[in-house]
Image (tube, coloured by chain):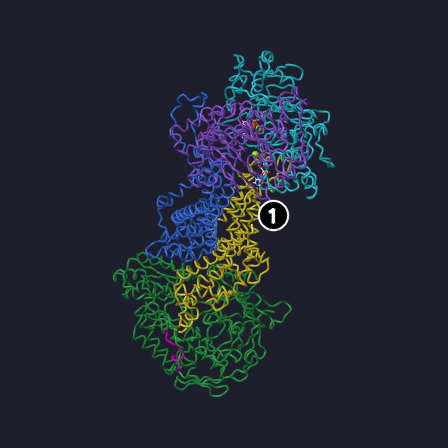
Chain colours: A green, B cyan, C yellow, D blue, E purple
Amino acid sequence: GGGGDETEAADAVISIGIGEPQHLIPSNATESNGAEVLAALFSPLVDFDADNKPYLVAAESVESTDNKVWTIKLKDGYTFHNGEKVGADNYINAWNHAAYGPNGNGGSYFLERVEGYKDLQSKDPDGEEGPKKAPDPVAKTLTGLKKVDELTFTVTLSEPFSGWRSVMGYTTFYPLPAAAWQSEGVLKEDFEQAPIGNGPFKMKGKWEHDAKVEVEAYDAFPGDKPKVGGVNYRIFQEQTAQYAELMGGGLDVVTQIPIENLASAPTDLGDRFKTSPNSVFQFVGFPTFQKEFEKVEVRKAISMAINREEITTSIFRGSQTPATSFVSPAVAGYRENSCGEACTYDPAKAKAAYEAAGGPKQIKITYNADGGHKAWVDATCNQLKANLGVDCVGTGEPKFADLLTKVENKEPVGLIRLGWIMDYPLMENYLGPLYGTGGSSNYYGYSNPEFDNLVKQGSAAPTQEEAIKLWQQAEDILARDMPVIPLRLGQNVFGHSERVKNVEVDKFQKVEILKIEATS
Amino acid sequence: MTDIKAEIDVLPGLDSSARLLDVENLHVEFRTQAGVARAINGVDIHLDPGETLAILGESGCGKSVTAQAIMGILDSPPGFVTKGAIRYRGVDLLKLPEEQRRKVRANHIAMIFQDALSALNPVFSIGFQLGELFRVHRGTSRQDARRRSIELLDLVKIPAARQRINDYPHQFSGGMRQRVMIAMALALDPKVLIADEPTTALDVTVQAQIMNLLAELRRERNMGLILITHDMGVVADVADRISVMYAGKVVEEAPVLDIYARPAHPYTKALLESIPRLDMKGQQLNVIKGLPPNLLRIPAGCPFHPRCAYARDVCRADPPPQQYDVAPARTARCHFWTEVVGDEPAGS
Amino acid sequence: MFRYFVRRLLQGVLTFFGATFIVYALMFANQSDPLQALAGERPLPENVRQALTERYHLDDPFILQYGYYMKGLLTGDFGTSLTNRPILEMMEQAWPTTIRLSFIAIIIAVLIAVTAGIVSAIRRGGVFDNTTLVITLLLLSMPIVVLAPLAQLIFGMRLQWVPATAGADSGLFALVLPAFVLSSLVIATQLRVTRASVAENLRSDYVRTARAKGLADRRVIGVHVLRNSLIPVVTLIGTDLGNLMAGAIVTEGVFNIPGVGFMLVRGIRTEDGPLVVGFVSILVIVFLVVNLVVDLLYAVLDPRIRYE
Amino acid sequence: MSNIESVTQAEVPTAIGVPVSPESGHEKPRSLTGDAWEDLRRNWIFWTAAVLVVLVVVMSAFPSLFTSADPGSCALARQHKGPSGAALFGYDFQGCDVYARTVYGARNSVLISLIATTIAGLIGVIVGMAAGYFGGWVDALLARGIDIVLGIPTLLAAIVLARRLSSDPNESGFWAVALTLGVITWTTGARIMRSSVISAKNQDYVAAARMLGAGPGRLMIRHILPNAAAPFVVVLTILLGVNIATEATLTFLGVGLKGDAISWGIAISESAPYVTETARPLVWPSVFLALTVLAFIMLGDAIRDAFDPRLR
Amino acid sequence: MSQPVAKDVVLETSNLVKHFPITRGIVLQTQVGAVRAVDGVDLKLRRGETLGVVGESGCGKSTLAKLLVGLEKPTSGSIDVRGQDMTRLRGAELRRARRNIQMVLQDPYTSLNPRMTVGDIIGEPFDIHTEVVPRGERKQRVRELLDLVGLNPEHINRYPHQFSGGQRQRIGIARALALKPEIIVCDEPVSALDVSIQAQVINLLERLQDELGLSYIFIAHDLSVVRHIADRVAVMYLGKIVEIGVEDEIYERPTHPYTQALLSAVPVPDPTLRGQRDQIVLEGDVPSPANPPSGCRFRTRCWKAQDICAEQEPALTEREQSAHPSACHFAEERNVVHAVE
Ligand SMILES: Nc1ncnc2c1ncn2[C@@H]1O[C@H](COP(=O)(O)OP(=O)(O)OP(=O)(O)O)[C@@H](O)[C@H]1O
Ligand SMILES: Nc1ncnc2c1ncn2[C@@H]1O[C@H](COP(=O)(O)OP(=O)(O)OP(=O)(O)O)[C@@H](O)[C@H]1O
Ligand SMILES: [Mg+2]
Ligand SMILES: [Mg+2]
């Protein structure tokens, strides 16, 4: 619970609701729950300001002349919670561990751009003769990482990338203390249960799975001091339960109020009900293997027949906003309505265009049933039925994995529901994975060499401004090709108890841990 | 059985000078789907302390129903007492509230049931079912109840009672179950005991012992006994008075010697004539011809007339024969009782 | 009797293997891509996929996988979940909670169902009978996905009589509401079965005897009739455990109780074979034990039933 | 309980020279079934329940008889609108006509539940009877089988079964759901049956029939089943209701009905979160569901009572 | 009646034994002994013969009867019905064999299915053994049977609970008679009946025997009834037959002290003789069948008992003073039935 009446506000312990983290090893914590906790335990090299520009935190400076070799100088005075001084080795060892393929770290792909990454991976030899054991990779360390002195090291990328500074703001790039290692390159078995970081808070006890993770202020932290004495990250299985607990008085912060409660939350919470933008981008994709959606006109007509406004207000109760671009406003370079006419609701025109293009009589939208998507899919279908005069069904697959399996098997899944949260605030983080050929989340198989090229050029551009320009050009191609229909942009819809104030939730859906305060 | 008799709530209005038990014009009917079965149509019986009244009658004539009505444990619905009074020491039991009526049971009037297997609860041990009486009515401790239960079982001649007290009814033989029922009825020292065929499942030696036991208790405690049985031998042995029932009515009532010597009702006569005797091995036993009446359609007039050798027109017409006084303390419901009494006695 | 126990034990062992095999097979049959399931909607980097596949033998044939699993199991090692937690540890956490929860739920259910069942059996067609019928129907027509949040909303959030959620190491008090919700799943059946059973036994001859003994109706019914009526009810308690587990999937989520139901759903959703099989193994053992107890209870309740 | 029909129903030619009493001619021989029917015919509860059940079944078969509205025509603009001439019960969250959806939902809910319950009932009777009656290794085998099925999480079984059963993407999943539900819900019935058979088979009348030379089939069907069925019938009638709700849960988990299927269970669970805004979309399907279950419970009770001659 | 001439034996048991385990504890049951309900019984039943079985309550009569019809499995020994060992038969064969041996159970109510009408109960044998009566005639046969046992055929549609105890008993008899079996084991078939019906039933049983050549094993407490119907009588005491012989031998010339005691205790339906009869009153408690006395089981209550009785179990054989088999070392005739005269 929150701080007692007697304790000073600064010593107060507040509670924040999270889900069970999958991992608490920085390079493996790729989902928001783990990231949320680690953000309290670790201090990043850079963080992002309100304009999504990186600013330095644990780094003294991050410099590059050619966007290829980056020199990182660390601030002096940072120590791990066990007293170890933070130095260049802590970063290099952590990153090597992160990148080494057999370690299976979820965040390893962030290091893809670093020179030598390929040598740390091994090819799966499984083939005709069935599964085989993979050979060890040829190298254990990244050639791109070089220690200069105790507090300085360089990162060499395989290709120039102007956004690298932003990339390093991600969880994967936290340092690890010497105490974390069992032997070289091997993490201690139970390090994860009580990670030792360099951040404003340190672990209090161990990670109690499915129950809580407790942290308390780390006195020797040289940076901005937190305004509370500790945080109890209480683990919940369902967001509805978090909200119930908030209402029942047992929890201080709920970072995402579930849709079910949105109708009553504003009145329940009054001015403690808040929203802030985040990076979630919701859309549906057209699988390229389905011939009926081949024509751009058909795809555009469908997009035009969807009344995004109505869905965000009626179904999402304003917790999401209509999307009319292919990236989220959380990144620099975002332009409103880059999608143009195709994302503007116009049922009459849509119907005419659809009929002219000879769109299919039946449309199917496939979604994963475990994500609470049924309501809006049904609503979308109802709109399509009414506006295009087609038959539309939403089909729920039990899990996202099932949906992917169907897509892989090229089953006629129809439109597939997808969503994206950024890893780092760059346009590229949307364009590459979502629309690039072979992009990690490009499940629908969109491929346009021209687009790929522009994205690549943008990444290699010497300055951010130039990069953005190129990326925007790439986005325009998307507007022309319409491989997906942008639907909605996410928002953090959060609430808190009367025991806390100054609650803010950032674009990564994390509570701003240094800002939050207890009311005395 | 020398219990320190705990205080039993005295029934209000209990009059020790009144008759021990007096059943007057009792009517019971069963309202079934097929119609109303008039099982009891005006039964009159009475009982004095220390007396044994035997109720005889064809199977299905309403003996058990009468007993159940006296106990107040008729299945209701479908069974209803529609008319009459059951007075115990002057108190009409039918008018008592259930709570007080309950206290009469087992304490004042107890009953031995006909069907011993189904009458015992199959899932409780004999010891529990016996001991329960003491525990509930007398508030004795578990051990005491057990001790007394063993005493009771000994009393009714169950071998090795101490070992078998924890057995369940299905582990007992038919006769043993019946004796358990008897023990249960005797447990609380009742003033009236209704024994519904208490010894049908017993061999003659045990039967003799049980009947002796009942006789002893009757004498010692001045207990009134209503004995319902088909065994004319037992009746001859122990009964003081006999009521013969037919179709839910008492058709003849008389002291035991008189009935055996000279029955005054044709039914009684026929009944006595069908007894097999140990010392004789006749070829054919006499039977009463015809069928017992259907209770849904009891014949008009004398219900026995379809089977009666004496029947004339008057018997077929309503009203049924009244209660004729044959002799002091002796009645019969037959228009031609004089004829019947006059005939050769049954048997030899 | 000893032989009976030994026999049941042997059966239990076979059942255990049968059950683990079947569940393992089911999980296997159901497997599409456990790693993707684990990752949710995030794309899975190839190297991660490779490393995890290797670690959990995911590309081995079914029999081999089962073999690995059983080998571990027989040495007391339940293996690790795909989330890299020792399954034994997860069980140590989940089982006590769930057992506590189910226990309270069953007690609540039995208390309510048996009492109400008896009363409505005695007064069949009376006001009480009909009222309970209506309430039962209302509960029945509310799936647990509706009932649990509703109860939470009313008693936990609005009235705040009880904690809105329970959490991992919750006290008994916090479990009362979830237990009530859970018990609603089984109350209906238990109540009506009790009612039917009691009504049936009320017509037995021994009831007449008991009344002739001058026993109060309370005792006649509460002791004599009840014991004879309990067999179906006891049976239900045995199987209701299954319903409770199924119901726990929702209830544990709503009230944030990290118990077996929740672990199972998570395991099933993430296609976490070892995790699910581990929990189901124990679950099957629980059922074996419970149903053994139920079978023995039959013999306790009805001495005519004998086991050799 | 339809097994209890009597073989002795055959017409009897008027007694030829049989020495029976004259009145005996009136009464035709009846059997328990005949008597039960006689009893039911005069039971208003039975008729009320029967009419309700018939109504619901007709509604499932021909929903268009009850409403002319299209349950699939929904518009968010009408979200949670109150009742009007067009929509008797108002509109739901998606702006669909609650009445039309309730009427059309009957089919999936009632038929699936009926089929599932029938399957569960059949398996339950067969397994429970066999286990209870034969005892020994048959019982061991079946009872342990029940233990295994109980142990297998419903969700897992449902996912696997539903997926295997409905690999055809054009299938609505109706049969898959019905079969799945039937296959996973029979255990309670089976155990209940087993327990009552265990107590019923020790009865004297079973021994008596065995003595007559009755085989196991006859003993089970004529003697044990009728006397052991009461709790089983109760469990089944309740299961009927439970299955309607479970169907909703399965559909919600994505392993139930496909696409835009309509059912009461789905309607209830989908509208539950908005109960504070408007209760109608939650209440109406619930009322229909409750009434249906009530009808079946009443029917079950009436039939059970009718088959208990001691109640007459 | 005269000595039954050497007719073919329809039923023979040899050394039939049934022990019921006595257990303590409910969950962890342990056997602490055994009730020796039937402890070595040898019987022969011939065609057309009635064997009466009498004996103390709890001496194992019902158990013996149940063994004979296969309702209980014997602990050891064999039961031959017309040369077939019933204890070895299984399945359909056993069922067919059962047609020939029927039983009237002691407890009338529990042996009737509460959910079957009387018509169905009595008609059931025909449904099982369909070859006996053609379908169309079954109903009629049921009515005949009802009539035969003195039940109103109008009651064909009633249920067991609607009958009185005696009426129920007759339903059981009618059912056993239905198949006209060769052997009927009657476990106290008339003890719940009123004398008139009792007479009817006995007459009926006798008539059927004459007409069909049935054999009966007739268990009863009413010795008068047994005498009336039985050709031979076996007297049981604590699981064993202690005396067996033709009816006259047992009633007129009993040689076993227990038989004598039994006969002397029979009540006579004549109130004038009350208290005048010469009853042999047995002393001592009835021993428990779980722990029977050594040697002669009756010795604990026997007025003739001597040391040898405790040491040596008397065999059931003919003896010097006993022309028929008697299990007493000191068997000696004594007329107790006519003792009053
Ligand atoms: N519940 C009932 N429903 C309908 N009729 C009943 C019911 N109980 C008893 N009867 C009828 O009432 C009549 C009297 O029954 P009762 O049991 O008193 O006979 P009884 O004289 O005791 O006969 P028995 O000597 O055979 O025991 C019988 O004809 C019986 O059929
Ligand atoms: N199932 C059983 N379990 C244990 N003991 C039993 C069982 N059945 C009978 N007995 C015991 O076996 C003995 C003989 O019983 P049985 O029923 O054969 O007696 P019986 O001669 O028929 O007596 P009765 O004349 O009283 O009916 C009794 O002591 C009885 O308690
Ligand atoms: Mg009677
Ligand atoms: Mg017996």
Q: What element carries label 1?
A: loop
Q: Quadrant of residue E144?
A: top left
- Residue E160 location (% of width, % of height): 51, 32
User: Please, which chain is the residue tagged with disc 1 on?
Assistant: E
- Residue D235 location (% of width, % of height): 48, 45
Q: Is the residue marked by circle 1 packed among few (<14), some (14-19), or many (20+) residues within 10 Å?
A: few
Instruction: Tell me if residue B216 can be seen.
Output: yes
Q: Is residue D54 covered in magenta? A: no
- Residue C274 location (% of width, % of height): 46, 64
Name the one closer to the observer, A246 or C129: C129
Q: Residue at x 30, y 65 (%)?
A: A300
Which corner quadrant of the figure contains ligand 1? top right
Q: What stretch is highlighted in magenta?
A: A115-124
Going by the numbered disc 1, the residue's amino acid type is Gly
Prevalent SS, magenta region: loop
Residue projecting furthest to the front: E320
Quadrant housing the N terminus of chain A = bottom right
Q: Is residue A119 covered in magenta? A: yes
Name the one closer to the observer, A515 or B114: B114
Relative to B73, is A139 above or below? below
Instruction: Tell me if residue B206 can be seen.
Output: no
Name the one closer to the observer, A339 or C85: C85
Q: Quadrant of residue A441?
A: bottom left
Relative to A453, is E294 above or below? above
Is residue A284 toward the left or the right of residue C189 in the image? left
Relative to E123, is D195 above or below? below
Residue designated by label 1 = E25
Name the one closer to the observer, E281 or E143: E281
Quadrant housing the C terminus of chain A = bottom right
